[in-house]
Image: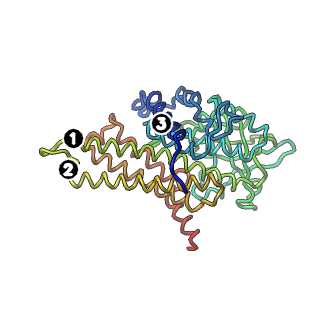
């Protein structure tokens, strides 16, 4: 494995950092406080070509971006953009909605949805979780009953990112509960489909700039041509998309961790107490070293996992370890950053405590840390 980067790839990352710094940070304190999703920033990102990085140029009117370059670019976005909710939302659509359509959709489905998502005209949500099936996602109760002219969907999805504003939802439902996970199928449901409605925005601890809510289906008739992939293919589809998503969402977190570290070092070099800079105190310098260690171990695991995915090699163990390690490292480093900055870290206006609130979500969404431990243990034969 060679994790060196070409000049072109480095330029892509640097360009992403500059773009994020110039266009995505203004008003973040107030937007985050009010829980406002900035559609103008979403459109700005689309204009820069971000949403198009997960699909070929045939659908994004841009250029082809290989996965490693896209991952590196999203790392740059996490470094330059202080709005972790926006970076999360972009990654969620790109890798859990657009990519499944690309990999499993018909050409008609690709042409219908991908250009709109890449341009920012359409927003897509990925809906798996239900009130009674969270970590045990494939015990879902939402049904898709075959009809002569399609499938009748009934059930509720909850805690769905982008649900309140989504134009289309990638929804998973079972065609026959007796089949267990092999009965789960996927459907693309347009917002204006009768029997489909979105609930209000849920308030949450962090990632407040990306709206989260429920999706309710009551005798919602979806045409057969809106089924994504074959019947019963939902498990493989969801598992595959989650592996891709984890690499790029966590890449953005890695970029945020690097920014945290640089700011902590800068503060420790300048802040003086008891006649010397606080970085000279071992309790402070040790925290910074821990932040550096978490950053570099997370980086190596991320790059390895992304390399395996791009080369179509098995990566189930690596993606689980990456999700577990980097997600928990972001929490620990965010807490250390607060401690290093003291009162400045605790006060909202400086934006330091916001990273901690945002980081906690990374130990829950896309598979909790406990579930990742179970996955790795199971793959080790335990």
- Marks 3/1: CA–CA distance: 29 Å
Q: Give the mark nearest the N terminus, 1 or 2.
A: 1
Residue 257, horizontal then vertical, whole percent? 41, 46
Q: CA distance from mark 3 to mark 2?
A: 32 Å
- Foreground tag (3 vs 1): 3
Quick one: quadrant of the C terminus?
bottom right
Please report the residue visible at 37 percent of the width from the left and 53 percent of the height from the top. Answer: 332
| Residue 190: image location, x then y, percent | 71, 35
The residue at which mark 3 appears reads as 14
Q: Nearer the viewer, residue 56 or 29?
A: 56
Q: Residue at x 45, y 54 (%)?
A: 298
Sooner in the amino-acid sequence: mark 3 or mark 1 = 3
SS class, disc 2: helix
User: Mark 2 highlights which residue?
Assistant: 280
- Left or right of residue 173, residue 16 in this image: left
Give the residue furthest to the bottom.
382
**Residue on which the image places disc 1:** 271
Q: Is residue 351 left or right of residue 72?
A: left
């Amino acid at each position: 494995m060679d994790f060196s980067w070409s000049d072109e790839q480095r330029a892509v990352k640097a360009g992403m950092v500059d773009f994020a710094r110039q266009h995505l940070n203004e008003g973040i304190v107030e937007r985050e406080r009010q829980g406002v999703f900035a559609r103008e920033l979403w459109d700005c990102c689309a204009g820069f070509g971000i949403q198009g990085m997960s699909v070929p140029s045939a659908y994004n009117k841009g250029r082809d971006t290989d996965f490693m370059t896209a991952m590196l670019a999203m790392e740059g976005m996490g470094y330059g953009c202080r709005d972790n909710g926006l970076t999360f939302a972009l990654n969620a659509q790109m890798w859990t909605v657009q990519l499944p359509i690309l990999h499993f959709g018909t050409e008609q489905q690709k042409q219908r949805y991908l250009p709109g998502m890449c341009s920012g005209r359409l927003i897509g949500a990925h809906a798996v979780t239900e009130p009674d099936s969270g970590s045990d996602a494939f015990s879902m109760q939402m049904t898709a009953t075959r009809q002569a002219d399609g499938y009748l969907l009934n059930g509720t999805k909850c805690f769905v990112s982008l649900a309140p504003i989504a134009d289309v939802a990638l929804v998973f439902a079972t065609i026959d509960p007796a089949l267990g996970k092999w009965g789960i199928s996927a459907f693309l449901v347009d917002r204006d489909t009768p029997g489909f409605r979105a609930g209000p925005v849920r308030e949450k601890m962090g990632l407040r700039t990306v709206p989260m809510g429920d999706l309710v289906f009551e005798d919602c008739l979806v045409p057969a041509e809106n089924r994504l992939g074959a019947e019963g293919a939902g498990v493989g589809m969801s598992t595959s998309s989650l592996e891709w998503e984890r690499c790029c969402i966590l890449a953005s977190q890695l970029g945020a961790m690097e920014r945290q570290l640089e700011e902590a070092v800068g503060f420790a070099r300048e802040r003086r107490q008891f006649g010397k800079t606080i970085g000279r105190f071992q309790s402070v310098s040790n925290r910074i070293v821990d932040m550096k260690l978490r950053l570099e171990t997370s980086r190596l695991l991320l790059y390895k996992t992304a390399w395996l995915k791009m080369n179509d090699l098995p990566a189930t163990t690596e993606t689980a370890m990456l999700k577990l390690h980097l997600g928990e490292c972001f929490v620990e480093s965010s807490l250390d950053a607060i401690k290093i900055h003291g009162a400045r870290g605790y006060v909202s206006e400086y934006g330091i405590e916001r990273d901690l609130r945002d980081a906690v979500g990374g130990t829950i969404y896309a598979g909790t840390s406990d579930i990742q431990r179970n996955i790795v243990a199971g793959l080790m034969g335990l």
